[in-house]
Each structure stands twice: as C-alpha cells, then as structure tokens.
C-alpha cells in the first residue's frame, strides 16, 4: 500500500512539473503583445492572483538585454524626464494617456489585446523620444497594458489614472512617492 502511495505521488509530481514546463515554454513566444519600432518586445504572462483568473504580468525585453517588468514608478519618472525637455508636449501626452485610460475595460481572456493604442498616436509626440530611456510608443503600449491589468484585477482601482492626473499638477516628489509605494505593495 505504501509503495502504491509513493508511486502515485511520483506520478503527480511528474505530471505537475511537466505541465509547468509546457506552460512556461508556451508562454515564451505565444504571448507577445507588441514589438516596438526599436525592437522592444512587450509581452504578458499569467499572473498569480487567485481572485482574478485573467490576471497577467507585463514584461518587456530590449534587444540584447534581459527581460524586465515595468513599474508605475518607471513610467512616471520617464514622464518627468520628458517634461523637463518639453513641458507643453509632455502635458499633451499626459492628456492623451488620460483619454486612453478613460476607455480601458477589464478583460476576460488571456492574453489581453491592446484596446486603444494605434501606431499613429506616436507621431504628435515624436519630439519626446529625444530624451529618456523609453520611447513614447513604449510608454503608450505599456501604460495601456498596465491599465488593463489594473481594471481586470481591481475593477474599482484607479492608481494608474490618479498618477497621470497628478502628473504636472502636484509636486513631482509626491507623485513619484505614490508610484514607489504602489511598487512596494
């Protein structure tokens, strides 16, 4: 009887491990959502929130670099860098992002699709690509995916929107602090 129990445990662990390996391999290519003109790949992986079956994690990979997970603080600091270069254009970008955020809906499938972004949205803001780590194209796509993630996991949540509403209105340190505190949760 004990031998049978051990055999069943072994089979269970083998099947569980095989499934996890299959799932990881499938996700390496299948869930690429967008590739920027600079060849930055932006993709999603299933999240782990049991209360949200469509939870996902946004990740990106720049050519020749390791995969990274963007955070709100990265995006907001990038906006301040662009604001130092061209304040009026950056505030127009902020308004564009707020318009996008007002139209984002939660998703009930995986992987999510972009709901608002169109390549022509980049053109009015190209000047801002001269400074900072990220292009406007990258900011728009990643911000949209993070907003979809937030709407899916927290339908009443509004952190992403509140950060952009505060940008350029409240002092930059309080806005960055809010983004950093979100990262620590």
Image: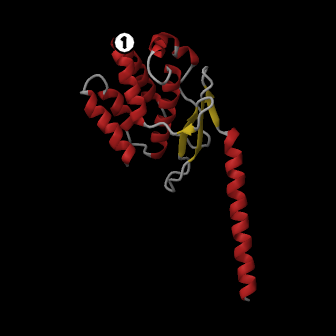
Residue depicted at 37% across the width and 28% down the height: 77
Q: Is residue 79 above or below residue 57?
A: above
Residue 58 horizontal/vertical position (percent): 54, 39
Q: Is residue 88 left or right of residue 43?
A: left
* Residue 163 rendering spot, x and y as whole percentages: 34, 32
- Taking the view exactly as shown, the residue that stands out farthest to the bottom is 1
The residue depicted at 61 percent of the width and 20 percent of the height is 37
Horizontally, residue 22 falls left or right of residue 66, namely right
Q: Nearer the viewer, residue 145 or 73?
A: 73
Check the image and report above or below for 97 versus 174.
Answer: above
The residue singled out by tag 1 in the image is 86
- Residue at position x 71%, y 58% in the image: 19
Residue 125 position within the rendered picture, expressed as x and y whole percent measured from the top left: 46, 13
* Residue at the extreme front of the image, as rendered: 64
Neighbour tally class for label 1: few under 14, some 14-19, many 20 plus, Cα within 10 Å: some
Query: Compared with residue 11, is residue 34 higher up or lower down, i.e. above or below?
Result: above
Tally of numbered discs? 1
Front residue (pair 37, 124) = 37
Please state which of residues 172 and 12 is positioned toward the viewer in this rendering: 172
Tag 1's secondary structure?
Answer: loop
Residue at 48% x, 25% y is 139
């Amino acid at each position: 009887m004990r031998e049978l129990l051990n055999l069943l445990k072994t089979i269970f662990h083998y099947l569980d491990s095989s499934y996890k390996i299959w799932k990881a391999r499938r996700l390496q290519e299948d869930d690429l959502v967008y590739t920027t003109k600079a060849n930055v790949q932006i993709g999603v992986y299933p999240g782990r929130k049991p209360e949200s079956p469509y939870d996902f994690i946004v990740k990106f990979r720049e050519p020749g670099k390791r995969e990274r997970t963007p955070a709100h603080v990265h995006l907001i600091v990038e906006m301040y860098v662009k604001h130092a270069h061209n304040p009026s254009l950056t505030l127009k970008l902020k308004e564009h992002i707020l318009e996008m955020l007002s139209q984002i809906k939660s998703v009930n499938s995986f992987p999510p699709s972009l709901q608002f972004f169109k390549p022509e949205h980049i053109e009015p803001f190209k000047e801002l690509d001269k400074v900072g780590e990220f292009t406007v194209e990258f900011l728009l796509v990643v911000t949209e995916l993070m907003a979809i993630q937030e709407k899916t996991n927290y339908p009443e949540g509004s952190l992403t929107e509140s950060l952009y509403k505060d940008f350029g209105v409240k002092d930059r340190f309080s806005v960055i602090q809010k983004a950093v505190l979100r990262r620590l949760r």
